[in-house]
């Protein structure tokens, strides 16, 4: 990765950045705070920076607006929504033709926005009208002029109150305090909106008229008893007339909604493809605007800084020099300088990069763990899935997704990863005699059996356990080896021997000790040497000998960590066997109906569902636990991560792919 | 009295006791792991609702308490193999041997359950930590793995007892 510095003439800035965007080979870093730019800024105009920032904001707003419109369009358009979002392929000429019609498409977008807003507004009105109608429906049969609240000397109210005690109390109090009143209880309405529930007193509709002088007191009395006045009071006409008016309004609104929705649908259908093109065009412009904002400017020049991969540097320079007057400087990173990381791996190893990325991108000073991770992931995944039939199904499924449906991005990488892993699973299935469990045995009623190349783990689980732990030991040793390699690369030979070598010798020694005999004696010597080295030298930073020895002993206790690591690999055996056992159970369940015609049908149904489920669970478990073994036991020995992936300035699109 | 004698004869026979130990080992580990992974999963779902890009990191932390279930299952396998259930010789297990198998399973039964739940809580908090500082994921993993040490020691104790210590 080379540090890239470019100085050019200000009028050519946008064109240069566009060319860089097309090349997609340089990551642009923020150069506006660079010393040179700040010094220059003191002597010349730099409203440029403000302009650039507001341009970015405007661009972001435009893209967001169009993105929202597109989401809405997809929602209202009928048809199946695709499960995997794939970018639509568009020929370059078509793209440029659409780009030329930018203003027209933008106008369509504006019309769609307006229609959507109109539809939403009308829907709100519809809701308002519907609820008003609902409430007024309760009073439809009452022939009362709503516009008046009485005469010159009489005030009346119409409304509801909860029946039973409440109303009786009100009536009594009213009669006591204002004997000059006229109260009429209206019959219960036929078209009640809410039918009374058992035990709850029905609401009572009534009219009450009193003298104007007593108006305030009665109003207070009404309020204290929970009086609800008739809705729409103050409007002209009777409730029935008001209802009719509202209904007519509602109809008009419904018609308006239908029109607006039809308009939206027509616009969406006609312009959706164009919107997608416009969205991606603006997205590319946004990237460009962001780059412009990061470029430092003086009165007549601009300064761009960033990172370019070593092998692309010359090409970039060549491409730019042929069109613009620029000065380019490239240098290797300084010692201790942090730079973004781009991985370069063999095509077979590349799918495994997604595993490392999920943990953390390698940081500047680290090695790329993927070539080491790949074979072990392959092996462990295969053993954990451990069934030839499942491996085949997984391979076919993932291949269909990658080359049939054409998925992109992380899903594609995972599929490629699983295709490799499924090869290992098929091999493992042959080694341990597992093809959809024991389906061959069950289907043939014991006459035939799937061949076992090595041994059947169900009859000899201890052997499988030992095999898993030995694999674990190899894995851990590889991790330690990687640590030693890193130390040696840094020139820290002594550290490599004392820190990694001592543990290696100790573990090998202990292993040989268990074997016994001559090797046992050798093992004893190795183990003691290793242990002594650790006790004496692992804490060699301490000055005082007693503390050094204590710390050394404490570090020796870390051997339990290694035991734990090795034991952790027993999950290979556990998961592999668990998958096999579940498959056997599925087969057994399928065979309960015998082997007549119905029996075979039952068997097929049970087998399809059961094995599909088992495949999904086993794959998930194999992926998660293999990853966990890599992250905890393997990476824990030598890998930190914490790096930043290289993110070049390029034309990123969301909906379409330009070909 | 007859009834109790018959019951105790069946219950305290070799094969039944060995089965019981194995079954509790598998169940204890599974129960604990289910709870532990569940606790971590709840935290994970909360974090992902705000930051869905952390899925990979959070998934690993959630998977960590699952180890104890596997260890329980492992102990079950080993007992089944050693006591002769898989090759049909378990009928000759004496009561003494059965009790030894049961006792050997006790470390796993007790410790896998409790350590899985404890590890689940540590994982859940590790997930919350990763939500704030995604770069500190490895520290979260180490913290959870510290709890696993005791599950491993218990597994080791049980394994050694089952594989080497059952007296004929």
Image: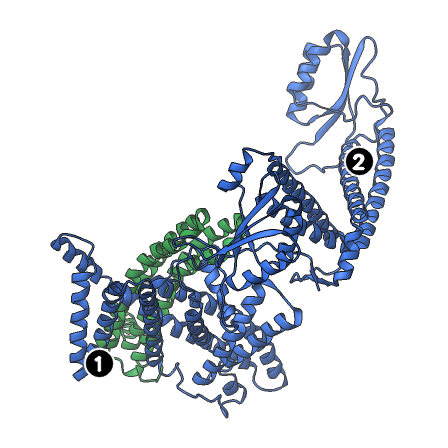
Chain colours: A blue, B green
Q: Is residue A484 above or below residue A133?
A: below
Can you name the residue that lies furthest to the top here? A213
Which residue carries the number 2 mark? A190
Residue at 78%, 36% in the rendered image: A125
**Mark 1 vs 2, N-terminal side:** 2
Same chain for labels 1 and 2? Say yes or no.
Answer: yes
Left or right of A594 on screen, residue B115: left
Can you name the residue that lies furthest to the left here? A546
Q: CA distance from mark 1 to mark 2?
A: 96 Å
Q: Quadrant of residue A474?
A: bottom left
Left or right of B21 on screen, residue A45: right
Which residue carries the number 1 mark? A515
Secondary element type, mark 1: helix
Residue at 47%, 82% in the rendered image: A427
Q: Considering depth in this image, is A429 or A472 the residue closer to the camera?
A: A472
- Number of the label disc, if any, that sits on residue A639: none
Q: Is residue B28 above or below residue A271?
A: below
Residue A462 in the image: state x and y as whole percent: 32, 79
């Amino acid at each position: 990765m080379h540090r890239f510095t470019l100085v050019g003439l200000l009028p050519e800035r946008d064109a240069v950045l566009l060319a860089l965007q097309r090349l997609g080979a340089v990551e642009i870093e923020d150069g506006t705070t660079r010393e040179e730019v700040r010094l220059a800024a003191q002597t010349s105009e730099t409203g440029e920076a403000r302009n650039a920032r507001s341009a970015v904001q405007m661009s972001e707003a435009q893209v967001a607006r169009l993105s929202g419109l597109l989401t809405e369009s997809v929602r209202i358009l009928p048809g199946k929504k695709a499960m995997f979002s794939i970018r639509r392929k568009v020929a370059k000429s078509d793209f440029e033709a659409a780009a030329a019609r930018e203003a027209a498409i933008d106008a369509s977008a504006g019309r769609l926005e307006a229609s959507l807003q109109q539809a939403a507004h009308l829907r709100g009105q519809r809701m308002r009208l519907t609820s008003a109608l609902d409430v007024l429906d309760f009073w439809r049969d009452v022939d009362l002029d709503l516009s008046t609240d009485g005469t010159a000397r009489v005030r009346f109210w119409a409304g509801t109150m909860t029946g039973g005690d409440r109303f009786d109390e009100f009536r009594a109090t009213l009669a006591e305090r204002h004997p000059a009143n006229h109260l009429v209880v209206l019959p219960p309405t036929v078209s009640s909106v809410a039918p009374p529930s058992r035990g709850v007193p029905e609401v009572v509709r009534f009219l009450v008229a009193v003298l104007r002088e007593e108006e305030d007191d009665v109003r207070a009395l009404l309020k204290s008893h929970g009086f609800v006045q008739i809705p729409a009071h103050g409007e002209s006409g009777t409730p029935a007339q008001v209802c009719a008016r509202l209904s007519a309004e509602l109809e008009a609104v419904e018609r308006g909604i239908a029109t607006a929705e039809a308009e939206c649908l027509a616009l969406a259908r006609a312009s959706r493809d164009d919107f997608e093109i416009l969205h991606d065009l603006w997205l590319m412009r946004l990237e460009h605007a962001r780059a412009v904002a990061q470029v430092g400017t003086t009165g007549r020049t601009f300064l761009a800084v960033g990172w370019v991969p070593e092998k692309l540097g010359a090409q970039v320079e060549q491409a730019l020099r042929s069109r613009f007057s620029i000065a380019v400087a490239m240098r290797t990173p300084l010692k201790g300088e942090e730079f973004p990381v781009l991985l370069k791996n063999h095509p077979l190893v590349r799918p495994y990069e997604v595993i490392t990325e999920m943990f953390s991108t390698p940081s500047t000073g680290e090695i790329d763990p993927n070539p080491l991770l790949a074979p072990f992931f392959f092996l462990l995944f295969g053993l954990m899935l451990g069934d030839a039939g499942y491996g085949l199904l997984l391979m076919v499924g993932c291949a269909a997704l990658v080359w049939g449906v054409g998925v992109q991005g992380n899903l594609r990488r995972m599929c490629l990863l699983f295709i490799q892993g499924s090869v290992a699973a098929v091999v493992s299935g042959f080694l341990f005699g597992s093809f959809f469990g024991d389906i061959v045995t069950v289907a043939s009623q014991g006459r035939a059996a799937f061949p076992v190349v090595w041994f059947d783990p169900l009859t000899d689980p201890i052997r499988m356990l030992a095999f898993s732990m030995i694999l674990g030991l190899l894995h851990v040793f590889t991790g330690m080896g990687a640590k030693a390699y890193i130390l040696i690369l840094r020139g820290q030979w002594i550290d490599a021997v004392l820190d990694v070598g001592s543990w290696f010798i100790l573990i090998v020694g202990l292993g040989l000790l268990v074997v016994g005999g001559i090797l046992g004696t050798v093992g004893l010597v190795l183990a003691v040497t290793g242990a002594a080295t650790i006790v004496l030298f692992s804490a060699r930073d301490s000055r005082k000998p007693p503390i050094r020895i204590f710390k050394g002993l404490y570090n020796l206790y870390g051997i339990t960590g290694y035991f734990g690591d090795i034991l952790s690999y027993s999950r290979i055996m556990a998961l592999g066997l668990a998958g096999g056992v579940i498959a056997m159970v599925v087969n057994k369940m399928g065979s309960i109906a015998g082997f007549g015609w119905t029996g075979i049908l039952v068997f097929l149904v049970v087998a399809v569902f059961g094995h599909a489920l088992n495949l999904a669970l086993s794959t998930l478990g194999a992926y998660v636990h293999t990853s966990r073994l890599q992250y905890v036991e393997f990476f824990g020995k030598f890998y930190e991560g914490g790096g930043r992936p290289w993110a070049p300035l390029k034309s990123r699109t969301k909906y379409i792919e330009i070909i | 009295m007859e009834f109790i004698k018959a019951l105790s004869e069946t219950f305290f026979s070799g094969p039944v006791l060995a089965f019981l130990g194995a079954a509790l080992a598998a169940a204890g580990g599974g129960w604990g792991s289910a709870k532990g992974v569940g606790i971590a999963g709840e935290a994970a779902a909360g974090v992902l609702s705000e930051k869905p890009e952390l899925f990979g990191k959070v998934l690993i932390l959630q998977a960590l308490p699952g180890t104890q279930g596997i260890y329980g299952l492992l102990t079950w396998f080993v007992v089944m193999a050693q006591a002769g259930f898989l090759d049909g010789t378990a009928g000759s297990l004496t009561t003494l041997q059965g009790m030894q198998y049961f006792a050997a399973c006790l470390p796993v039964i007790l410790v896998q359950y409790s350590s899985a739940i404890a590890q689940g809580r540590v994982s859940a908090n590790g997930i919350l930590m990763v939500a704030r500082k995604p770069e500190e994921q490895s520290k979260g993993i180490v913290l959870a793995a510290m709890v696993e040490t005791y599950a491993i020691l218990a597994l080791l104790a049980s394994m050694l007892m089952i594989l080497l210590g059952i007296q004929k």
